[in-house]
Image (cartoon, rainbow, N blue to C red):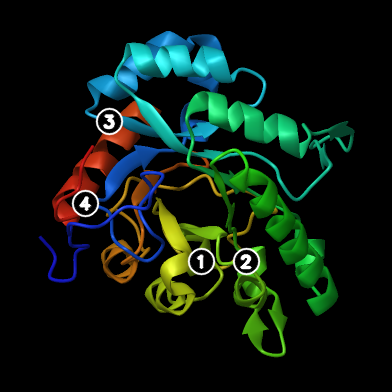
Amino acid sequence: MVRNAVRATSTDVTDDGRTPMGTPSTSVKISVQLYTVKDAVEADLDGTVARLAGLGLDTVEAFDFVRRPAELKAAFDAHGISARTGHAFLLSDEITSPDGTAGALPGLEETLEAAATLGLEVVIDPFTPADRWQTRESVTALAERLNRAAAAAEAHGLLVGYHNHDHELRSTIDGVPALEVFAELLDPRVRLEVDLYWATAAGLDAAGLLTRLGERVVAVHVKDGPMREGISTAELPRDQVPAGQGDVPLAAALGAATSAQYAVIEFDHYEGDLFEGVAASRAWLAQHLQGASA
């Protein structure tokens, strides 16, 4: 075990059975973002979930769940899998595809209803483009919209959050990374999911960022790869590797993520067999998280 591994502790729970913000859960759950295996999920949902369960995982982070929550839940239930966090757009009305065409996104109520059906606890917006993180006014508008989503989510017994890439941290407002400005404007109910790879690619010390963000952090994305100039969401890297095999200081970051309840494996792209990559990352995490459960 690393000296500063995340330690499991006992905890109280709120009246609705949730862990209070800032209290470590009984154990940090090792999860995987289903975006990692999205092509396999589309081709064979049941077989893919069974294969993830066979790797020793009992927790996943849902992806593209709004269009078929009941189908996903049935597959998860059949193989002893649960999804407590999931990605869905909360801060955008449409998304632009690589060919430049725009498509409408599901509305907030539809998204929250699907999340409740699936059994999620936290719905996390996975991405907003860089141009919305350049000014205090635009960042304030994002925070206000997510705060409104938090109020709506409460009626469904849900929380909401945001997941970073590099651009929210490269952009600064009065010398402060835009994501941190955003965090200061959020309702106390709103959570953050910190992507350790993208935080490091943006030039930040991920452990220091996690310390500053404090108890808002409910989950971290665990991925690795060589750190070099030019890593950006503008052109996703193709040289990511399993956790512990690259340059991201994952152990130090995990040690600083004292409120995180989920360590979520993800690859944006992996040249090898994705399931072998997930298995290798899970094995590394199991060694580096005291009390981890997967």
Name the residue at 72% across, 65% down.
143
Q: CA distance from mark 3 to mark 4?
A: 17 Å
Can you tell which mark lies on residue 199?
Answer: 1
Disc 2 element: loop
Marked residue nearer the N-terminal end (2 or 4): 4
Are discs 3 and 4 less than 8 Å apart at CB? no
Image depth: mark 3 or mark 4 in front: 4
Disc 4 element: loop
Q: CA distance from mark 2 to mark 3?
A: 32 Å
Type of the residue with mark 2: Asp
Image depth: mark 2 or mark 3 in front: 2
Residue furthest front in the image? 15
- The residue to which callout 3 is attached is 57
Q: Dot 3 surroundings within 10 Å: few (below 14), some, or many (20 or more)?
A: many
Where is residue 95, by image quadrant? top right
Residue 27 on image: x %, y %: 22, 50
From the image, which quarter does the C terminus lie in? top left
Q: CA distance from mark 1 to mark 4?
A: 26 Å
Q: CA distance from mark 3 to mark 1?
A: 25 Å
Type of the residue with mark 1: Ala
Residue in front for this viewpoint, 90 or 36: 90
Name the residue at 18% across, 46% down.
286
Marked residue nearer the N-terminal end (1 or 4): 4
Where is residue 98, by image quadrant? top right
- The residue to which callout 4 is attached is 26
Q: Dot 4 surroundings within 10 Å: few (below 14), some, or many (20 or more)?
A: some
Q: Dot 2 surroundings within 10 Å: few (below 14), some, or many (20 or more)?
A: some
Are discs 2 and 1 less than 8 Å apart at CB? no
- Up-down relation of residue 121 to residue 115 (above or below): below
